[in-house]
Image (cartoon, coloured by chain):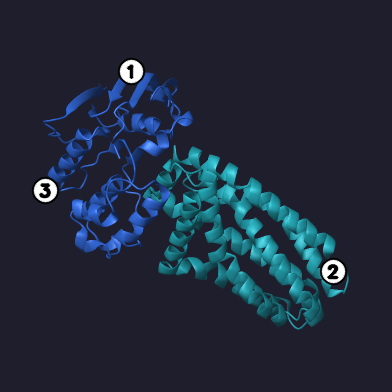
Amino acid sequence: MPNNSTSRLQGSDLSCVRDDRVLFDELCFELNSGQVLLLEGENGSGKTSLLRILCGFREPDAGQVLWCGSAINDSQYYEDMAYVGHLNGVKKELTALENLKVSLALGKAGQYSIAQALAKVQLADFDDAIVQTLSAGQQRRLSLARLLITHNNLWILDEPFTSLDIKGITLIESLMTEHCNKGGMIILTSHHDIALPSVDVQRILLS
Amino acid sequence: MSLFYAFLAIIRRDLLLAVRRRSEIANPLLFFILVITLFPLGIGAQPHLLQAIAPGIIWVSALLAAMLSLDSLFRSDFDDGSLEQILLSPYPASVLVLAKIIAHWLVTGLPLLIVAPLLAVFLGMPTQSIGVLLLTLLLGTPVLSLIGAIGVALTVGLRRGGMILSLLVLPLYVPVLIFAGNAVEMAGSGLPVDAQINILISILCLSLVLAPWPTAAALKMSVN
């Protein structure tokens, strides 16, 4: 439940080098409760690399990521964050319900029950459907439902709007606004223009 | 308590997936049966020779069947992003990885144990050594899954890791093969096999405790 108003994510002097190419250098940012950080830039400008550094999958080549003042590996970071990447992270052979049950078991229970979360992403009638039979947009919404059922404060989203239709995008935007208004924070990359009128959005342009 | 719940949830998920994708269970088992049934055909009418090499045949086939099934351990989770979610869980990755290995053994190792006595009779193995064969398989095949997991975790990010995987893992399988094969052979001659069994037990305990850590660390490297 995003109730911790003191959480803060800081990146200090982050740099990432990939195949001798400097993607970004001395990147600094600070994200506080209720804020959104939008990463912009062309394909290959290092948006996903930055997100993966923030998830701890990749070590930054310089600098460090701090959660509430301590390094992410030494803090409660992994209890407070949730990640939805390029890949949905759902098993195609399982039903929507079974997938969410596993996600719930892997984390701590959050704000919504599985049934409420499925209703929120408008998949209430699909809980017993094998994921393979769902459309790409429905699968995307299912993976975003994971954010609602587990305890988390920080959402890290890599292109969350991929394969969603206009209604789906509006839906996810309203969920994001709700999350921020409760004191949560979001880092995302997106090629779409996002409309979050009541939220403090910071932008980082990677080039 | 909730760590135990997560552990069980992973096992349950992987067993459910195995039931929905039956070829994962059937492939290594079919391979095991096919290889063993081919030996009598290749060797011809020499029952004594067949009887003498039966422990070796069964163990080498089990080892190759285990190798064949290894790739499926993390492949699909790696491809669909579930592995990232497992590693991002607040619970220790090594425990969750151990759950995956146990589920994998239940799906690919346990069936070998069930058909092995039948195949042992088929190869003319003496009755007194069938019990020991089962015991060595029970102790040895989990070791194959545990050690193999380290190799798969290291190679899952590579496009064609199959060859490297066998080079990495096979040398580590050799001790299990030696002690298990030797135990079954000795049992056939009515000799005591306590020493070999004890060594297999200690190998199993060691790998049960030590294998999940490097596996989890290697997976973290692979998803990068």
| SS under mark 1 | strand
Q: Any idea which chain is the cyan one in this picture?
A: B
From where the camera sits, is residue A184 visible?
Answer: yes
Residue at 45%, 70% in the rendered image? B22
In this rendering, the answer to whether A176 lies above or below A167 is: above
Please tell me which residue lies in front, A171 or A179: A179
Q: Residues within 10 Å of mark 1 (few under 14, many from 20)?
A: some
- Marking on residue A28: 1
3 vs 2, front mark = 3
Q: Which residue is mark 3?
A: A167
Give the residue type at disc 3.
Lys
Residue that mark 2 sits on: B186
Residue A39 drawn at (x, y percent): 25, 28
Q: Are marks 3 and 2 on the same chain?
A: no
User: CB under 8 Å between callouts 2 and 1?
Assistant: no
Earlier-in-chain disc, 1 versus 3: 1
Mark 3, chain letter? A
Residue type at numbered disc 1: Cys
Which residue shows up at 34% across the image and 40% down it? A82
Residue at mark 3 to residue at mark 2: CA–CA distance: 71 Å
Left or right position of B8 against A110:
right
